[in-house]
Amino acid sequence: MPEFSFNTLQGECSGVYKEKGSKFLAFAFPVRTKSQAKEIFEGVKRRYFDARHHCFAWMLGPGQNEYRASDDGEPNHSAGDPILGQIRSKGLTNVMIVVVRYFGGVKLGVGGLINAYRSAAEAALNNGSIIEEEVYKRVTVEYTYPFTAEVMRLVTEFELNIEKQEFTDACRMEVSLALRHESKFLEKVERMKQIGISITVH
């Protein structure tokens, strides 16, 4: 069953958790790519350069199929996994959370760390706004100018978002199609192909 939509953050949010003198600052961001997540992490690390640890987790894709977690020097699975667990438990994707720790002089133990990183991540997400986003596919439409009216009816009927268009003798349009419309769209375009309109779903 394809995922037609997913939940993510509307914007950046943050939270704080304190335990035995240690301070955990959590920052959550909406992200779309691994490179964007890396860039955000480097920015947080530069801003809080004096912190002992900079742990993070991110999850990408409508099916939550791409993810990564980092303990950044904390005991294995005591930081990154609890952060990732909060993203999962909220049912979110395209989200990154960075938790910065300022050490307070008292060791918390693995159980204490797991609780602290989980609580910090949860605090950040609780301060954020969650939104639902549709999943889209990219579609290329190629046609000759006389068929412009037919193509524009297709755009209206299936609420296609026009990304780019070229009007010459051979017209071309790049659009995005909501995944929930895909099956009906494909039925409709089979008929249009017969009259010389080329449609490719990527």
Image (tube, helix red, strand yellow):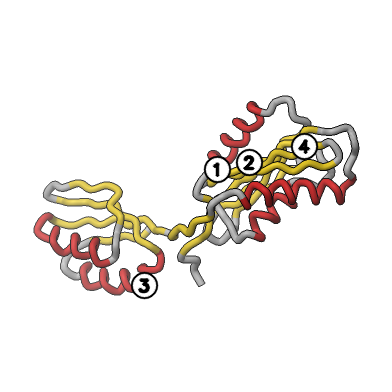
Q: Position of residue 163 (x, y in %)?
A: 30, 49
Q: Quick check: 13 above or below 202?
A: above
- Mark 1 or 3, which is nearer the eye? 1
> Image quadrant of residue 45?
top right
Residue pointed to by mark 4: 23
Residue situated in front as seen by the camera: 96 or 125? 125
Residues at discs 2 and 1 in contact (Cβ within 8 Å): yes
Residue under pointer 2: 27
Q: In 3D space, how far apart are the residues under numbered discs 2 and 1 (Cα atoms)? A: 7 Å
Would you name the residue on which mark 1 appears?
Answer: 12
Residue at x 70% of width, y 56% of height: 85
Tell me which residue sits at (19%, 60%) in the image: 152
What quarter of the picture does the C terminus occupy?
Answer: bottom left
Pointer 4 and pointer 3: residues touching (CB < 8 Å)? Answer: no
Amino acid identity at mark 1: Glu
Position of residue 9 measured from the top left corner of the image (x, y, whole percent): 53, 51
Measure the C-alpha gap from mark 1 to mark 3. 35 Å
State the residue in front, 108 or 96. 108
